[in-house]
Amino acid sequence: MGLASRIIGLAIAAAGFFILWVGIGTNDSLSIVWSFVGMFVMAMGFAMLTSRSKQREKKPPPPTVTEIRCNSCDFKEIRDFQKGEYILKPVEVTCPKCQSAMTIEGIYIVREEPDEKYNI
Ligand SMILES: [Zn+2]
């Protein structure tokens, strides 16, 4: 589908160029009109090409972090989320403080907050 619309966009641009070329080549009063039509069609074709390529760009998913907590003391660690993790799942790592088992306490999506520093 993406490739097909690219070809259509390219064909429209090419058709616009052809109309423009014929319009410039014609020697009657319609020459200017054809030139404008050609430019317009060409712009439409290129717009189709560029808008398509913009739509294809995918935003990376927001970063997710996992909060793990020691079962014995209150040591907490936040690290990158790994597939298959869920809240209260025991993890293989042990607490660096007391060597106890650790459990996932929370999974958070890190949102990129808009800059709200408007200190006047
Ligand atoms: Zn601990």
Image: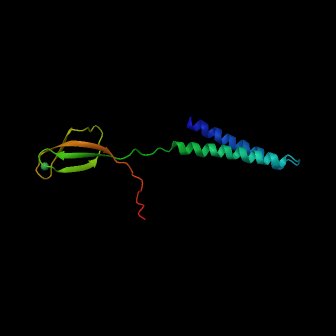
- Please tell me which residue is depicted at 57% across the width and 42% down the height of the picture: 52
Q: Residue at x 62, y 42 (%)?
A: 48
- Give left or right: position of 60 versus 72: right
Q: Residue at x 53, y 42 (%)?
A: 55
Residue furthest to the front: 120
Along the line of sight, the residue nearer the viewer: 63 or 108: 108
Q: The N terminus lies in which quarter of the figure?
A: top right
Give x and y (percent) for residue 23. Answer: 81, 47
Quadrant placement of the C terminus:
bottom left
The residue at the far top in this view is 1
Task: Report the coloring of the rendering.
Answer: rainbow
Q: Residue at x 27, y 49 (%)?
A: 79
Residue 46 placement, left or right of 106 = right
Horizontal side, residue 44 vs residue 115: left or right: right
Picture coordinates of residue 103 (x, y %)?
19, 42
Q: Nearer the viewer, residue 4 or 59?
A: 59
Q: Quadrant of residue 7?
A: top right
Q: Residue furthest right?
A: 28
Residue nearest the observer in this picture, 7 or 112 = 112
Q: Position of residue 100 (x, y in %)?
A: 11, 46
Total marks drawn? 0
